[in-house]
Amino acid sequence: MKLTNELRNELRAKVKALKKAKLELRKKYNVAMGDTMDPAPVGYVENDQERHMVFDRWRKKLGKNYTDFEKTVLKILKEKAPVTKKSEQVKLDESNLWLWGGPTPFWGGSTAPDALVTAAEYFGIKNGVYVYGSTNAEMIGKHSSFNKLLCQINKNCRTKEVQDELTEEENAELLSKLSLDFPNITGAMCDDVTNNLKGNILPAEFSPRYEALKKHNPDLKLYGTVYVHELTKKDFTVIQPYIDVVTLWFWSMNEIVDYDENIKRCQQAFPGKKILQGVFVHDYGLSDCGTIPELLNFQLDRARKYIKDGILEGVVLLGDREIKKWPTVAAAVKKYLQEQ
């Protein structure tokens, strides 16, 4: 169901106000993107010495700008419900559900080598997208509990100085070799793959790492992160042969209300490609808060229908650091997965 003009205008106004408030608070308190969280419960003691601690009064400081936006979103979701019948959905399980994460000093993350593994145990997720850290036999071994594992091969968002001695092509070939010894490796992830590129995306950066990934194991798939807001601004035509699966993310949580339209835009931008649906527990683009649980439920419900329809390959949840940053939101996602 499309939004009425009245609701659309109301949403735009609330988005504009919330985004302005976010930027003003970042400047006032010198807070970097993602370095925000809810206060820890009374008596909580942090047991992860590798964790990067962050600003814990963020949502309270956003105040009415956040709550007004939330009220509008809940009004919109009420108009759109019911999302779909349960008979039209598949279950999110070991065949189609992934958790994204890894050791990082940024965004309230942890540099603990097993950060992703620990978080997967919390959510009960059996497949991992291992990013940020080193890709070598030791680290892959720490993730051997995953049924399926995707590993990062490009430099975007990777922790500073991690495998800087290798080119992205060399990283891709290394992963290809490692997959022969670690059969749970099913592919490679290129994070923020076109963020710094504009207009017609050319294959110069794409074809070498794609070919290197397939060199020792042609069954490996290459996944590339793309954002909803990029779909209408860039031409991906000539790189189609060098991305097997599009990992599509809604950078700002207000984009989720137009879920169906945005999936259609991705299909038009990447005809014939499967899509892995990225789900942010932390809303980086708009508020720097935890994503509204009702929006997450809506997104996951729609994704389950599109998996059944053969349009989505699955869902990847980000992620590991959000469990401690937004415990109420993370618990709501865990409950959803348990009760679906």
Image: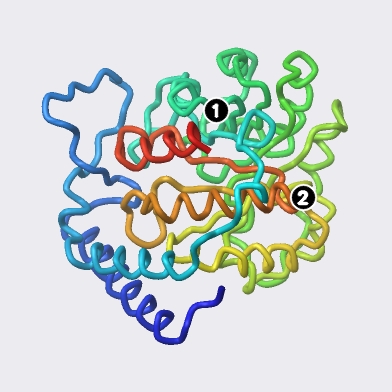
Helix, strand or loop at label 2? It is loop
Residue 162 in the image, given as x and y percentages of width and height: 53, 30
Look at label 1 and name its amino acid. Answer: Ile
> Could you say which is closer to the camera, residue 90 or residue 173?
90
User: Which residue is painted at 59% across and 34% down in the image?
Assistant: 98
Q: Nearer the viewer, residue 254 or 22?
A: 254
Residue type indicated by callout 2? Gly
Q: Residue at x 58, y 51 (%)?
A: 192
The disc, 2 or 1, on the residue closer to the chain's N-terminal end is 1
- Coloring basis for residues: rainbow
Residue 338 spot, x, y in % from top left: 48, 31
Measure how far apart labels 2 and 1 are at the Cα level.
Answer: 21 Å
Quadrant (top left/top right/bottom left/bottom right) for the N terminus:
bottom right
Q: Which residue is mark 2?
A: 310
* Mark 2 neighbour density, 10 Å: few (under 14) some (14–19) many (20 or more): few
Left or right: 305, with 161 as reference point? right
Residue position for label 1:
125
Left or right of residue 124: residue 275: right
